[in-house]
Image: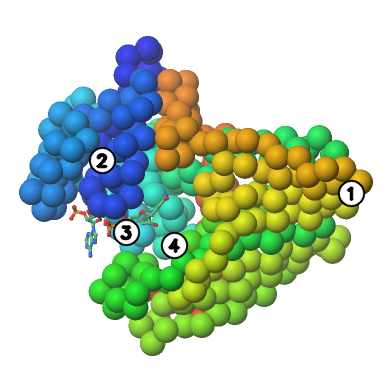
Amino acid sequence: MSMGKEKIKWGILGPGKISAKFAHDLSIVEDAQLVAVASRTPERGIAFAEKHNALRSYASYHEMLQDPEIDIVYIGTPHSFHKAHSVLCMENGKAVLCEKPATLNSKELRDVLEVSKIKKTFYMEALWTRFLPAITQLLEIIESNELGKIDHVEAEFCFEAPVDLKSRLYDMNLGAGSIMDIGIYPVFLAYLLLGIPERIEASGQVHSSGADQTATIRFFYPDGQLAVLHSSIVYGSQMPARITMTKGYILIQPRWHESAELTILKAGYEPKAIACKPNGKGYTHEIDECHRCLRTGQIQSQIWSHQNSLDLMALLDEIRLQVGVRYSVD
Ligand SMILES: NC(=O)c1ccc[n+]([C@@H]2O[C@H](COP(=O)([O-])OP(=O)(O)OC[C@H]3O[C@@H](n4cnc5c(N)ncnc54)[C@H](OP(=O)(O)O)[C@@H]3O)[C@@H](O)[C@H]2O)c1
């Protein structure tokens, strides 16, 4: 699909909590239009469409995918449905931006990417943090070599959630646990900055439901570089991230995964603050990237590619294996 100057027309599949935030940001992207929303619960779909100015709502996902006006579908359902919904969209000729994690494991993701390749349809995991100004600037600073080489990366994603066995965070049928929901962010940062580690050590507390409530992850790299990462759904944290380099360090100010400021601390210099406020809630940047790809007829982003999603998923597979978290699809 290669598109001209007309607006890119979106559908939203699964109008839940994150979809509402996404729809807000879609409304401030000039060349985006929210055409339709699909919910299995018609009243939820109608209310969402009204609130977010969608032209129409559908009471079935399949029905929305027959709408010829829709170019791309944003999938905002729980993780365990990501594979089926991504495949369903692409088989109906719709490009896909699917919430993170892309799927529950590498096997599922390979199946999704195969459909993208066969159908020549755009697919991207909604790893929105990758597109934020904070991350773009961070990479520029690191590449400038001003602070030397990375020694270690420390990052976490922790919040306190109630123990609710029916919730997405505790129900294994919905892809429960801290690793897949939020641990994915620190793992992403380490992968982005240091690549695939030589060795992984991961441990955590696993609830009787089977969901990991905490995880502590260490990535070891061949020349002594290290990443120390945490996720938790039982305790909170301020959530800074720190990149320690040979000539100083960079703080990604909290909450780092949606940061608006970097601080550079270089020995012998005053701390330097770098503003990098995201546009909207931060989802506009990934939306812009989808538009760029659709307008140039690409089936994947070069910034967060299919291989990047596969690498990230392989890391999550190994971390879950070590911590002892298994889904029925494993
Ligand atoms: N990027 C971010 O910042 C961010 C933040 C939060 C979450 N997320 C990701 O977004 C995804 C959705 O999270 P959420 O908290 O927004 O989910 P949610 O509000 O609980 O559910 C979203 C939608 O999924 C469908 N759904 C929910 N529970 C279901 C069930 N038991 N069986 C079948 N369908 C179900 C519903 O669709 P219907 O309306 O059709 O019933 C619902 O509207 C997750 O994969 C999560 O990792 C991303």
What's the amino acid at mark 2? Ile
Mark 4 within 8 Å of ligand 1, using the beta carbon: yes
> In front: mark 2 or mark 1?
1
Task: Name the residue beneath numbered marker 2.
Answer: 12
Sequence-first tag of 3 and 1: 3
Of all residues shown, which one is farthest toward the right? 268
- Residue name at image x 88 percent, y 52 percent: 246
Task: Name the residue beneath numbered marker 3.
Answer: 78
Of all residues shown, which one is farthest toward the top? 5
- Residue 260 shows in the view: yes
Mark 3 within 8 Å of ligand 1, using the beta carbon: yes
Q: Is residue 180 above or below residue 171?
A: above
156 or 67: nearer the viewer: 156
Q: CA distance from mark 3 to mark 2?
A: 14 Å
Task: Name the residue beneath numbered marker 1.
Answer: 267
Sequence-first tag of 1 and 4: 4
160 or 110: nearer the viewer: 160
279 or 166: nearer the viewer: 279
Q: Is residue 33 above or below residue 158?
A: above
Q: Residues within 10 Å of mark 3 (few under 14, many from 20)?
A: many
Mark 1 vs 4: CB contact within 8 A? no
